[in-house]
Image (cartoon, helix red, strand yellow):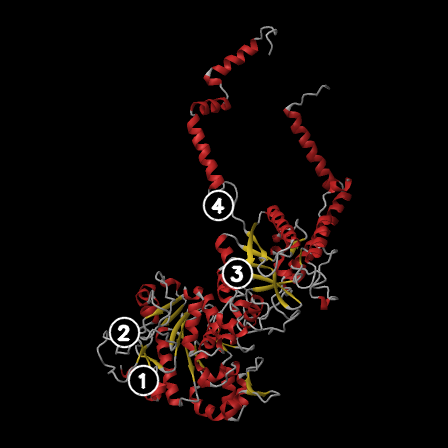
Amino acid sequence: MSSSMPYDPSFEDEKKRQYSYKHRSFLDRVGATIAQHKRAVLGIFCAFFVLFWFGSSRFTLWSKDPKIVLILAVNDGGGVHKWKGEQEWAIERISIQNKRAYAKRHGYGLTLKDMRTARRYSHEYREGWQKVEVLRQTMREFPKAEWFWWLDLETLIMEPQISLEEHIFKRLDSLSYRMLDKFNPLDLPLDIPYVDYSQPPELLITQDCGGFNLGSFLVKNSKWAHLLLDVWWDPVCYEQKHMMWEHREQDALEALYANQPWIREKTAFLPLRSVNAFPPGACSEFSDDPRYFYSEEDRDFVVNMAGCAFGRDCWGEMQRYGSLLESHNQKWWRRFY
Amino acid sequence: MALKPKLKPMSTSNSLQKRSMQFKNVFVDSKKRRKQAFTLSVFVGIALVLYLVSGLFGRGRPTVNKYPPVHGHYINEIATTKPLIFPAVENAAQLKEMNMRSLHILRIDMDGNKKYVLKETDQPITEKERKQMTDPHEIIKRDYLDHGKLVFRKGTDSPEVVIVTLVDFDNYDPQTLIKVVQNRVNYAQRHRYGVYVRWAQEFIPLLEKQNLKESYEYLKPMIMRAAFHAFPRAKYFWFLDQDALIMRMDLSLQNHLLDPKILQLAILKNVPVVKDSNIKTYNHFLPGNAEIIFPQTNGGYLDSSSFIAASGMYSKAMFDYLSDPLVRDFPWQNFAHCVSHALQWHPSILAKTALIVPKTIASVYDPAKKADEKPGVDAFHYTAGDLVASFYGCKDRGSCIKDIDTFYDKVQTS
């Protein structure tokens, strides 16, 4: 307001109103209070700053405990036996980014677990132990989570817009199967005594051409699961079988499923392609069987480049599915340029 | 701005009336329209009926996933309403004579390995068919095979405690076995418990090592699992060896041991699971947590001649684990060693297991001591007034039958 302006009564009124305490606006009053108690306010601010910045990660005002937690096994081998190359680092980066974006989008938790070859697992009786131990550790870390989804490093979530509830939990009855009468690559006994199939499943795994596959599986955070993780690795069983159990914890689980009804009654199988689709290179001797392989038309949820480190090109496969993922999830405005 | 005619409140109600009149006109006024309304309602009615009928049929349709019902080792089972399930022990001599060879199917493979197998799909015979049988041996065989198919099913009614015993016709004569079974039945009837007695030989075809001497102990988790299945609503299952007798008919198991306050006193806390083990039982064990209850002997070993399991996930897991061929066929020193391995290596099971003083359910009879000795002196050996007299070690002494005889007379006279 310039001085050349004529006398304006309304402006004078406004001024008066501002100065009289009763008519001061709320913000003004807050400002005045802060100005009065500068030190106290600074103290409170510093306290909050320290709490958020250096305090426990649990201390937040708005985040709630996630119901589903993704466990991503990273740093497989940890470069102990062979040098970790540039491509391995890149694969790891892409895979983590993929899971992180997915978890963020749907409000899930994500935890990265280091699977490096450690000395404490080097004994032949212990080498199958690592996955089980990591799972137990994660369960302690997220006591309030309901489900855990284990993912190997060489996986990509191809349809990140689909939530797990929508994809699996809401249609679990129709999607999963509990008996192996239709698909039984290992020829496990179909029916053993005392199995109560009316129990809701608490372990959701898949089967590939060679038997159980634990590259991508879901386990509930329950008493049963804790007991399973406790019984899974047993020195007596492992001592007898460690020469035959090439896939360690996978084979141990197969043996448990075959003989122990309390484990069988809470285990359900998902079709491989629903959470664990293979690229053509894996299970290559069954290349004409559509049950195993990722299909672009059907938009399978997850692709798992299982065993790509054994004579296949991990980086090539990762690039291929990565670009496919990008083209599927292109935003509409991207088409203009 | 166009001028709006001011509406009076009166006129609004007028317009409402008009509208309702119009509405009536649609359906009621003309005959033609009434007809239309009628046909419409008929269509709606038919659709409704069809919907209801389809719902009726839909409910009857089986669900997509049809899983087999829970069953034991035999797929076909016989439901009984009697809570006392025990075999015809008076036939022990005939069964011994008939031998495993004629009771079970023997399969010989290419390499000449002989193995008894269990026919899971074996059909139980009906009363009528049984009456038509003439050969007494055939009847005994049928009774023997059908005994394993008995399960207790009587609505929601169920005994709370079931006493489980494995009897053996090869090493015991019928008189002794009758005493053993009668002892359990008397006790069960007095306290409204159930009894589940099976022939040990019935389980032999399910094993790798098919001889009773070697495998008898390993049948215990199997019969416990079978008992869980036979009495799905019972809470506690008490396994009591055939070389043991219940000496106090008046003591109920709940009042004597299972009451948490009493169990609290009997639990051994912070003791090594087995002698010289680094793994100790939990110091803060709550008796309410106990799903598996094992007595520990004086020497610090587990006593598998008498133990209790509450039916639940942990006890089922424990017995399934012990019956897993990989675990069962491992060269253990003995069965108690196998159980203590499970407890030492699997803390979740140990957290549900109570080790208790043996005097409660497994006082061992020592022939060197007088049984009438005053109680309270010895925490391990049997003294008058104990619930159970266990003849642990009688096989080595060769006195099992004699011991059962003397003690059975004592129970009867007291």
Mark 3: which secondary structure? loop
Check disc 4 and report the residue beneath it: A58
Give the chain of mark 4: A
Quadrant where the N terminus of chain A is found in the figure: top right
Q: Nearer the viewer, mark 1 or mark 4?
A: 4
Three-letter amino acid code at the position of disc 1: Tyr
Three-letter amino acid code at the position of disc 3: Ala
Residue at x-position 44% and y-position 32%:
A44
Q: Nearer the viewer, mark 4 or mark 2?
A: 4
CA gap between label 1 and label 3 equals 62 Å
Q: Is residue A62 left or right of residue B367?
A: right
Quadrant where the C terminus of chain A is found in the figure: top right
Where residue B390 is drawn, which disc sits there? none
CA gap between label 3 and label 4 equals 29 Å
Q: Are marks 3 and 2 in contact (CB under 8 Å)?
A: no
Q: Is residue A119 left or right of residue B266?
A: right
Check disc 3 and report the residue beneath it: A118
Mark 1: which secondary structure? helix
